[in-house]
Image (spheres, helix red, strand yellow):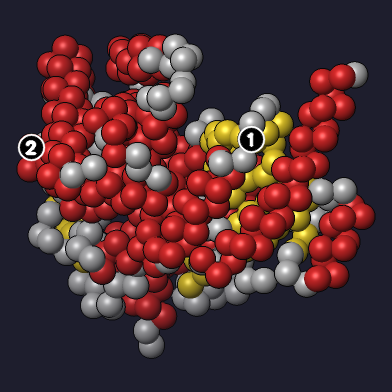
């Protein structure tokens, strides 16, 4: 097959599949924007599973005369995933970290779609496999119009070699964290907690959690039980593209337990709401990030509290 | 035979997730991406194996339910290969023992005590032996199919 023809077929696959995906996302956003979600819309699982699969099938249709085997179709699916991710960052305004997180899903399901498409469009295949496309579109529509709600809580604890009254001061507010980040997402640019300030040490006082990129989470202390319980609601979340419309941090809490031997067990709790689905994928990331935020703060509190 | 630690970890600790629809295929796609970036020759070898098997009478390929390409004779499975090069084939225990004595194959990565075997294809150099194993399995599957058909 001539080289020029092959290139045209390849490019057609890239262009048609991406155009289809953006039209479908655009239409679903227009039709289904939800006012209670600050107008950003929930990102349903279909957008990360069904759309990449359909993109793969569209590619396979355009590439059917190229007789691609697994290796080359995998490579071109990889290129197409990169293109889709690049276009998402330009047209959907997604942040780099989000795109890194989403990329395994996009590549995986696009690759799967390409394989399914190759089988569907085989010359000797007389089965009515095209109904798969209708089925996938049906799932997309049903998923898009369904209600999605997911909240979770993450809990971590550490032992601090200091009594609760000494730990408490550093829990309410603390000096800037100077330790280097060890979590890989923080190291590649995801904002990490840096310092916390308070307007007062009482219930109802304002609290600010300042992140490494300067973003500030506005908080309000809702429980101030000295040396035992500090609970705060997040009342103002920064408009960062990495989190906006994807996750809302709802509440944070520090519980101090006196171990009776001069040490304190510090428990950190966070509650959040996810706006990205499937939960079985995104909640792994949300838990991991929350856990690393917890430990960065709690290790710092431990270091400050254990200072002689 | 050295299997990837990521694969071992996933099979050992996350194996219970294999019944989640599409998750094994998603995992296999990640293995393929890893192979694309680190071992281009492996994917070439898998393509060569697939091409050769599809030239045998009555064969076809499908997606394996736990990720990878499944080679079939009619509707019966001959074996399957995951995108990190692990080729899984079922033999009788007697044949498995003979093959184990040759020292090139391992127990299956999950069903160690069954007739299933695993052979790790790392590149083109392993294609010939992989095809030898698959040919044995193909002939056995053809016989099984004929018995099944006539009974």
**Residue B150 is at least partly visible in this image:** yes
**Residue A85 horizontal side relative to residue A274, left or right:** left
Instruction: Give the residue number, with chain letter if any, for mark 2.
Output: A91
**Residue A119 horizontal side relative to residue A214, left or right:** right
In the foreground, B151 or A245: B151
**Residue B17 is at least partly visible in this image:** no
Quadrant placement of the C terminus of chain B: top right
- Tell me, yes or no, whether dots 2 and 1 are on the same chain: no
Residue A176 sits in which quadrant?
bottom left
Q: Chain of mark 2?
A: A
Q: Chain of mark 1?
A: B
Farthest-out residue, bottom? A308
Pinpoint residue A178: horizontal percent, then vertical percent: 23, 77
- Residue under the image location 80 percent in, 42 percent down: B140
- Residue under the image location 55 percent in, 52 percent down: B49
Mark 2–mark 1 distance (CA, rounded to whole Å): 50 Å
When the figure is inspected, residue B73 is found, relative to residue A200, above or below; the finding is above
Quadrant placement of the N terminus of chain B: bottom right
- Residue under the image location 61 percent in, 57 percent down: B86
In the foreground, A90 or A193: A90
Crowd rating for badge 2 (residues with CA inside 10 Å; few <14, some 14–19, many 20+): few
Pinpoint residue B21: horizontal percent, then vertical percent: 53, 30
Q: Are marks 2 and 1 in contact (CB under 8 Å)?
A: no
Residue A255 sits in which quadrant?
bottom left
Count of number-bearing discs: 2
Pinpoint residue A219: horizontal percent, then vertical percent: 21, 46
Crowd rating for badge 1 (residues with CA inside 10 Å; few <14, some 14–19, many 20+): few
Q: Dot 2 lies on which element? A: helix
Instruction: Give the residue number, with chain letter if any, for mark 1.
Output: B57
Q: Dot 1 lies on which element? A: loop
């Amino acid at each position: 097959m001539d080289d020029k023809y092959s290139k045209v077929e390849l490019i057609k696959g890239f262009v048609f599949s991406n155009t289809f995906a953006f039209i479908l996302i655009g239409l679903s956003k227009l039709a289904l924007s939800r006012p209670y979600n600050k107008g950003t819309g929930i990102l349903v699982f279909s957008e990360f599973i069904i759309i990449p699969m359909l993109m793969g099938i569209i590619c396979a249709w355009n590439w059917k005369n190229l007789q691609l085997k697994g290796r080359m179709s995998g490579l071109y699916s990889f290129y197409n995933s990169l293109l889709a991710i690049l276009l998402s960052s330009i047209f959907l305004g997604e942040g780099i970290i989000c795109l890194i997180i989403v990329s395994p899903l996009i590549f995986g399901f696009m690759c799967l779609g390409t394989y399914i498409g190759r089988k569907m469009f085989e010359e000797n295949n007389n089965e009515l496999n095209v109904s798969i496309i209708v089925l996938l579109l049906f799932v997309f529509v049903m998923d898009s119009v369904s209600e999605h709600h997911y909240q979770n809580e993450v809990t971590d604890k550490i032992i601090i070699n200091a009594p609760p009254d000494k730990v408490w001061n550093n829990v309410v507010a603390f000096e800037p964290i100077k330790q280097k980040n060890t979590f890989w997402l923080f190291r590649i640019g995801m904002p990490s907690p840096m310092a916390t300030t308070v307007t007062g040490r009482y219930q109802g006082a304002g609290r600010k959690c300042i992140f490494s990129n300067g973003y500030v989470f506005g908080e309000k202390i809702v429980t101030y039980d000295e040396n035992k319980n500090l609970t705060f609601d997040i009342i103002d979340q920064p408009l960062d593209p990495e989190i906006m419309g994807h996750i809302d941090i709802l509440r944070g809490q520090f519980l101090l337990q006196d171990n009776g031997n001069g040490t304190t067990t510090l428990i950190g709790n966070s509650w959040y709401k996810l706006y990205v689905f499937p939960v079985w994928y995104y909640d792994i990331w949300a838990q991991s990030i929350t856990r690393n935020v917890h430990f960065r703060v709690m290790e710092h509190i431990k270091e400050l509290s254990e200072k002689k | 035979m050295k299997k990837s630690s990521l694969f071992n970890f996933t099979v050992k600790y996350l194996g219970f997730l294999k019944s989640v629809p599409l998750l094994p295929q998603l995992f296999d796609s990640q293995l393929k991406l890893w192979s694309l970036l680190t071992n281009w020759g492996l994917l070439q070898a898998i393509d060569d194996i697939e091409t050769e098997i599809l030239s045998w009478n009555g064969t076809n390929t499908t997606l394996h339910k736990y990720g990878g390409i499944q080679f079939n004779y009619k509707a019966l499975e001959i074996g399957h290969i995951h995108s990190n090069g692990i080729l899984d084939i079922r033999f009788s225990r007697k044949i498995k023992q003979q093959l184990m004595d040759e020292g090139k194959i391992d127990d299956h990565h999950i069903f160690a005590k069954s007739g299933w075997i695993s052979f790790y294809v790392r590149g083109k150099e392993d294609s010939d032996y992989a095809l030898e194993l698959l040919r044995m399995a193909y002939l056995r599957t053809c016989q099984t199919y004929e018995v099944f058909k006539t009974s």
